[in-house]
Image (cartoon, grey):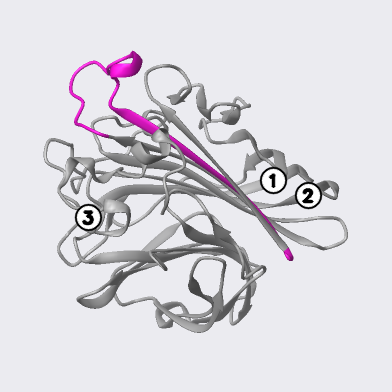
Amino acid sequence: MNAKSSAVALFSLLPMLAGPAVSQGFAGLGTDAEGFSRPSLGTDLSFPKDHGAHPDFRIEWWYLTANLSASDGRDYGIQWTLFRSAVAPETGTPTEGWQSPQIWMGHAGLTTPDAHFSAERLARGGIGQAGVLAAPFEAWIDDWRMAATGDGADEFDALSLTASGPDFSYDLTLTATGPLVPHGDAGYSVKSPQGQASYYYSQPFYEIAGHLSLPDGDVEVTGHGWLDREWSSQPLSETQDGWDWISLHFDGGAKLMGFRLRDREGAPFTSATWIDPDGTPTPYGNGALTLTPLEETETSAATVPTVWQVEMPGRDLDVRLEAINPQAWMATSFPYWEGPVRVTGSHPGRGYLEMTGYGD
């Protein structure tokens, strides 16, 4: 990973600056988090407060993926992510100005069947260039924005979403048709046998409409979106090198979140949440979900699995995931693969796949 500027070089050390070694977990997420708050079992999530930032924790993100289609049936996918990371613990009143220890990074991606576009923004906290407000909800970095637009019961009920890069942009509206969904034990999501954990919930019920701007013109699209909210201070163990994460929308109305955390010294750790069409979640612990790579693709930077078998016997689930565009590599400061997938088998549908920790 080459630093593009002093700002990139700074962020490339995050979120591991509070710990001693970059090699501990993907992107340093397994380093010790002394001085930062840690998730604790039995803590109730609180809304709209928890839609906002948690500066006493080291790392968090607001992460939206969407499976979209044009009127001619052509598939598209978009990603919008805002990361907050702290270079040092912050206690008491948040520090303003350039002394703020908060660093922000934005990623945007747009995937078509034959092209993938990505962009990155970096910002310091405390000077207004990036941030998050809980109510009315707004998350921004430069001119990229995710913001509440309605008067629903929850701040996430209706959102607008914008981002742009050198060769693309998108402008979308999101309307939730179901409830917020906690993962794990009421939002306490365990990530390793050693007990590393995060707070984690989603809004997986967005109906989306809007337009994409591409080099060959604008495209009107509709589809489904999934927003993840997660925060922690040490979400991985020292030996976990990366993860394979899925969010799936099945044609029958149910949904599935699942992940496999790879460990260089042992078996992968898995977790899943089955979501009924009415939003009722059922969490599944380690071992209930199996993700098996079937075919690999050599991308511009790494060889990654882009066809998977996903099985969950407890739900009679046996499906095959195939990337719409196997070349959906995010060439960002922390590089990874991110793109839409088609789902066939026992529960057909569409979804998103994220894979980190592959390649150099």
The secondary element bearing badge 2 is classed as strand
Q: Dot 3: what SS? A: loop
Mark 3 neighbour density, 10 Å: few (under 14) some (14–19) many (20 or more): many
Res. 186 in view? no
What are the residue bounds of the magenta stretch?
A: 87-114
How many numbered marks, from 0 up? Answer: 3
In percent of the image, x 47 and y 59: which residue is there? Answer: 336
Residue furthest out toward the left: 34
Distance in Å between CA atoms under marks 1 and 2: 8 Å
Q: Residue at x 52, y 28 (%)?
A: 140
Q: Residue at x 21, y 32 (%)?
A: 88
The picture places residue 273, in percent across and down from the top left corner, at: 41, 63
- Judging depth in this view, the residue of 194 and 214 nearest the camera is 214
Task: Give the label on residue 30, or none.
Answer: 3
Q: Which disc, if any, is residue 208?
A: 1
SS at badge 1: strand
Marks 3 and 1 sit apart, C-alpha to C-alpha, by: 35 Å
Task: Say which of marks 3 and 1 sits in front.
Answer: 3
Between discs 3 and 2, the one toward the N terminus: 3
Q: Earlier in the sequence, mark 3 or mark 1?
A: 3
Q: Residues within 10 Å of mark 2 (few under 14, many from 20)?
A: many
Quadrant containing the N terminus is bottom left
